[in-house]
């Protein structure tokens, strides 16, 4: 997925878990427009990361991905000002369409 995004002229930075993503964001937030996170990351779930990101920056767009319909409901997403919830990342076209909408 990262290679596909780079091929569409996105600058991509990957982290191994939610804690590492939060630390990286804290150091580089001025250069981040969109955060794409998995709801089921190690060490910090996507909604927890979204809450932390919102306490730092209200403008960054946050997209959460999940493979489980019951795992992330619309109310939770709206409470954390999530820009979009993606069910599965299997189809690159869907991700690209969502990214264009929040850009």
Image: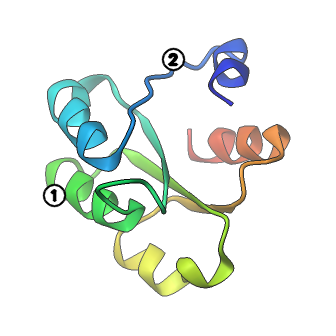
Whichever of callouts 2 and 1 sits on the residue coming sooner in the sequence is 2
Q: Cβ–Cβ below 8 Å for labels 2 and 1? A: no
Q: Which residue is mark 2?
A: 11
Q: Quadrant of residue 9?
A: top right
Q: Is residue 69 above or below residue 30?
A: below
Position of 23 compared to 89: left or right? Answer: left
Q: Position of residue 66 (x, y in %)?
A: 61, 63
Q: Quadrant of residue 28?
A: top left
**Disc ID at residue 55:** 1
Question: Which residue is drawn at the image coordinates 43% and 81% (left, top)?
Answer: 76
Q: Position of residue 58 (x, y in %)?
A: 26, 53
Position of 96 compared to 93: left or right? Answer: left
Question: Which residue is drawn at the image coordinates 30% and 39% (left, top)?
Answer: 21
Question: Mark 2, residues whose alpha carbon is within 10 Å: few (<14), some, or many (≥20)?
Answer: few
Q: Is residue 8 above or below residue 23?
A: above
Position of 21 compared to 85: left or right? Answer: left
Q: Is residue 77 above or below residue 24?
A: below
> Label 2 vs label 1: CA separation?
24 Å
Q: Secondary structure at mark 1?
A: helix
Quadrant occupied by the N terminus: top right
């Amino acid at each position: 997925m990262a290679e596909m995004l780079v091929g569409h002229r996105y600058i991509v930075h990957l982290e191994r878990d939610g804690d590492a993503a939060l630390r990286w964001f804290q150091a580089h937030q001025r250069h981040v427009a969109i955060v794409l996170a998995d709801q089921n990351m190690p060490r910090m779930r996507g909604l927890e990361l979204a809450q932390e990101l919102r306490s730092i920056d209200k403008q960054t767009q946050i997209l959460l991905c999940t493979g489980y319909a019951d795992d992330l409901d619309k109310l939770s997403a709206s409470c954390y000002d999530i820009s979009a919830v993606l069910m599965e990342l299997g189809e690159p076209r869907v991700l690209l369409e969502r990214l264009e909408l929040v850009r």
